[in-house]
Image: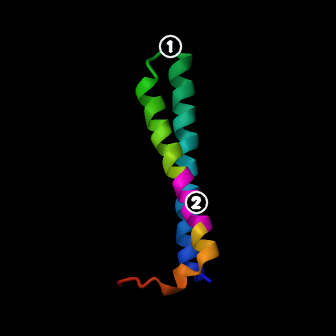
Amino acid sequence: MPDDHTLSLATDYVVAVRRCVANQKARIERLRQVGAYTLDAEHTLKVFEDNLRLSEENLEWLKSSGLATRLVRSP
């Protein structure tokens, strides 16, 4: 079973990426409201969403695998 510190770090990362996704969606909405170009912002959102999906999958894998207890961190 993963140690609490490793799971906490992974969970915090997922939360941060979710925040990035939400912020980017809000940015796109603001751009649309003023009729601005959104394609680059939409591409960035796709990258954030892909990163979120992978991060969530990795967190679930980490929770179920027990690998975190075998990870060694350098000081």
Three-letter residue code for mark 2? Glu
Q: Residue furthest top?
A: 35
Say what secondary structure mark 1 lies in.
loop
Mark 2: few, some, or many residues within 10 Å (few <14, many ≥20)? Answer: few
Who comes first in sequence, dot 1 or dot 2? 1
* Main SS of residues in magenta: helix
Mark 1: few, some, or many residues within 10 Å (few <14, many ≥20)? Answer: few
Q: Which mark is in front, 1 or 2?
A: 2
Q: Residue at x 49, y 86 (%)?
A: 70
Q: Is residue 58 magenta?
A: yes
Q: Which residue is mark 1?
A: 35
Say what secondary structure mark 2 lies in.
helix
Q: Is residue 40 above or below residue 52?
A: above
Side of 45 relative to 64 (left or right): left
Q: Which residues are magenta?
A: 53-60
Q: Which residue is mark 2?
A: 57
